[in-house]
Image (cartoon, rainbow, N blue to C red):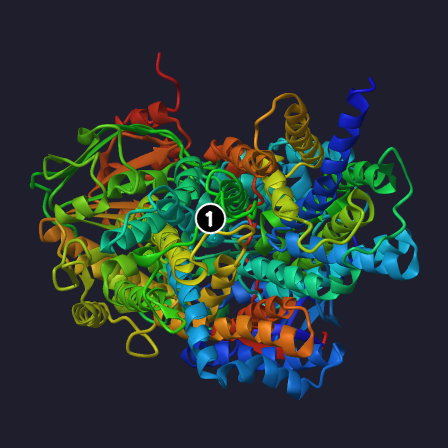
Amino acid sequence: MALILERRVERARKWMWLSPLLALALTVVAGAIIFALAGVNPLHGLYTYFISPLMDGWDREKLIAKAAPLVLIGVGLAVAYTANVWNIGAEGQFVAGALLAGLVPVFLPAWQGPSVMAAMLLLGVIGGLAWAMVPALLRARFHANEILTSLMLVYVMRLAYDWAVRGPLRDPQAMNFPKTVRFEGWQVLPAWGEIHLGAAFALVAALVLYVVMVKMLKGFELRALGSSPRAARFAGFSEHRAIYFVFAVSGALAGLAGACDVMGVSRQLQAPYEPNYGFVAIIVAFLGRLNPVGVIFAGLLLALSYMGGETAKVTLGISDNIAKVFQGMLLIFILACDTLILYRIRWQGRA
Amino acid sequence: MKSVPAQTPLLEARKLTKTFGALTANDAVDLVVREGEIHALLGENGAGKSTLVKMLYGALQPTSGALFWKGEAIAIANPAAARVLGIGMVFQHFSLFEALTAVENIALALPGDFDLAALSQRITTLSADYGLPLQPSATIADLSVGERQRVEIVRCLLQNPKLLILDEPTSVLTPQEAEQLFITLKRLAAEGCAILYISHRLEEVRRICQRATILRQGRVVAACDPRRETPASLARLMVGGDIHAVRAHRDEAAGPVRLKVNELSLPPDGPFSVALKDISLAVRGGEVFCIAGVAGNGQSELFDALSGERLADYGHAVEIDDQPAGRHGVNWRRRHGAAFVPEERLGHGAVPMFHLSDNVVLTRHAVDATVAANRRVLRPGARAIADRVIAAFDVRKGKPDPEARALSGGNLQKYVVGREMDRNPGVLVVNQPTWGVDAGAAATIRQALVDLATRGAAVLVISQDLDEIFEIADRIAVIARGELSEAHAAREMTPEMIGLYMAGMAEAAEAQAAGEGSHGPHP
Amino acid sequence: MDAVLPILLTIIAAATPLVLAGIGELMVERSGVLNLGVEGMMIMGAVAGFGAAFMTGSPYLGILAAIAAGAAMALLFGFLTLTLATNQTATGLAITLLGLGLSGLIGKPFTGQPITRLPNWHGIDILVIFSFILTGAVAWFLFRSRAGLIVRAVGDNHTSAHTLGYPVIRVRYLAVLFGGGCAGLAGGYLSLSYTPQWIEGMTAGKGWIALALVVFASWRPWRLLAGAYLFGAISILAFTVQTFALGIPSQFLSALPYLVTVVALVIISRNRLMLRANTPACLGRPFVPDR
């Protein structure tokens, strides 16, 4: 017996909706098996992982707070991947944004007022954007594979951040702990409970990019380039311009997410700092069908997987790596289910 | 050679049927091929010829029906099995590996020891014997289309085939190269090899084939001796009715020059691409100017330079209505009245996964305010244009606004040509307008090109199809190795002259044009 | 000599995992498949190899386990990209993300545990020697054997290979499994010989660097070996310099391998025509035959 793919004449609309749901269902089933293997009652495990974080109001706030950076980064990546440009270095751009935003409280501690908040957010955007411009330039100018360069730059930025926080940015009063001074007053994002302003940014970014991708010529251009580069060139669209554009958008949003994270959550820079939002946002982008509105829901789901991982660690004593396993499985299942959009699957006996 | 009773056919297919989903590509096809005959398989694009021979070669499995080899029922499980039986095949779109050498390509099709040095020796001997010179160590990417075909043929010959299948072999050859191929085929037939010859060129079928089987819409409609038929009677059998010839030529083109190319040169832009050398031409309003040439001689590079997908070094290299366009991109050229139809329908002329209406936006977003304005895409406007094109060109489709890839080749080509015609352009550049398109759609497209010229547009057609060129051209030039010949009035050109130009023998061609009729070199 | 030998041995230790993983990926890419899951297969090899060695006490069983774990991940990758024709870029990323998480989950009890290290002479062990044999064997296979020619043919034009009757999907499965086994082995080298211990995320991007090396080597085995050693030399020399020149932050030196990789990619990719002529023409393109 062998699996046979039959090409569909057109994409199956039905499966564009059903595929993520099927993938989620398969992930839950696979998760139950993993819990069973780990010696945990599968139902109890699944309840702890997926449901219990939603039962508490405080946790629900935390969920939105966690989803905010994922959505911010994820919508940018969705735009990039639509254009077939593979920025997988959002984690580095995120850290760059955090680092640059953190310069203000360290070097200008006395600066207060709304302008400082704007400046820090702007610096975050600039940091992410600048760091994203490196792989963009190397791809557009030297044809260097952006997957590899953007990823390498994650490691470089993590080390640069580590050096900065242990060196020039360290709070001399912190007893040699690798962290900066705490951000105060206007250096901190306004928050409602756990939810900080970043969540609003995420919502706005998703809606704006939705309009751009669906209604505007720019979105048409990016979809054409991603789907058929030669035909897009025939339409007069420039591949180079698109590379810079999508790296700029995804880098800027990742940088903004980084600034929001340090301004709204940790309220200082600390080492080590490896939130992994930049990598998980890759999954968010795919699960959201590369559609900015879909990314909002996907972001919430992946935020839940983070929270579930923490809950599982505390109440079940399982390593929080379980979250990464769930996230990886989810991406694998969604890719597998997406096959149904383009193909019919048949079983066939060997001839 | 084994003796087979003369009445037993070498290969016989009975009621061979192949379906792909709902589509029946071959419907109860009967075919008989005998030793030593050159047997034509005729039919227009989409008639099911390729499907049939792929089943004979084991590349596809029949849905039902039976095959007999020397009178015995067989199943051909895969191409390797076909090769073991003695069936060789030369593909239309070659099955060669560009990055590998000729000898490596040939070794991949041969069983037995893996000894490239010995194989090279055999290749050299055999290819010299059959007048098909070949360098075994050459990389395929560096070879011309004709040389690639030689690799395929030699690959088959090395297996001592009893049946050789050739799919449209002359469509990529110059007339002179085709003559050489006919000599080789006749010799093979004389040696007892059966040849199944797929073509839609009726003249050459009548010249070299003893029998013909004609397919239409997947069915055998006739089996005949092509030497006793006329091209017109064969064509009727293929198409199932008369094809309207393109309406007569217009008066002498008198319009102003609307498209001009001045000493255009461009370096190659890829490892397998051709450099353009010093190309000059002028197309007047009201005329159809055709560029003939064998595939891979710079046609797509010239098209890209004309459309603005690649920019020239200076503005006057390309002029549209007397305005320098060489440094301007494709949308500037469109805004100045030009339109373009590239060779590849899917993936160049249209985005396969986009709906037909979105494919309107693709080429009209910069020139049509009903399609895109204020940086927004206006889908109702695009839909309206798509519907107009579909109605005007009778584009057949399964649902209101399908994805481009869901259309058949002929219908998508009509749509892509119609999309540009709908703008009523002053200059139209088309590369291979009817490549792989059924006869009905081809006639529609050719008529539309002629009509556009009649309305005063300059129409430049790049084509490999000499029949097409002689049908619609007012003037003809030939592109070979990135150089363009002098243009001649169509009525002064002959296929032989075009062949000489294709072979790069411009001087001999000029001599013929001047009526000297000699091939000797000029002093 | 006394000063040179330790440096040389460090270079060997840095280069060997890159050679092992790189040669495997080279075979995969020659068959037309882009496997971005090398990092994930490598770390699974590292944890499985360590775990097996820890539980059985035999580093050799560890090696086998490492290969098996890498190949198991490769099988999953192959099922997705070859049988289900999924996007190879995204699938490779998914395999890497999954591998990083799964290895952390499995490896939890092994953290900080000791194992019997692979027997070696000044750090030169069986895997170092094997990396040279592997390079030679793959070079011979690809360019001197019929099977290797078929692999190259499948990577150059899968449609033609299919038309000639070659089983494109099966050839690619075998190449992917081989590549996964090599990546797993590379991971095993890290946890059984190089460190030797289990540390979460211990591959630290080496799988990605191996991917870059394949491009840098223009898909040629001996060039890949040379590239890996050049790469090892540059990053190790920097560490040596550190002992003389004070004041260079250690983070900068740690970042050097990644920066070198980026620079190497830029150098090799600069000439677009040459890059395209060397790249297997079907790299990254899914194959679904008409039936």
Furthest residue toward top: B523
Q: Position of residue A242 (x, y in %)?
A: 33, 49
State the image quarter where residue C62 is shown: bottom right
Q: Residue at x 32, y 75 (%)?
A: B397
Callout 1: residue from which chain?
A
C147, B302: nearer the viewer: C147
- Which amino acid, mark 1? Thr
Q: Nearer the viewer, residue A272 or B512?
A: A272
Horizontal and vertical percent position of residue C192: 82, 49
Residue C60 location (% of width, % of height): 90, 52
Q: In the visual, does A255 lie left or right of A344?
A: left
For image coordinates 31% across by 61% down, the residue present is: B413
Query: In the rendered view, would you say A143 is above or below B377?
Result: above
User: Measuring 23% from the left and 45% from the top, which residue is drawn there?
Assistant: B330
Look at mark 1 in the image and give the residue it sits on.
Answer: A180
Q: Is residue B199 above or below residue B233?
A: above
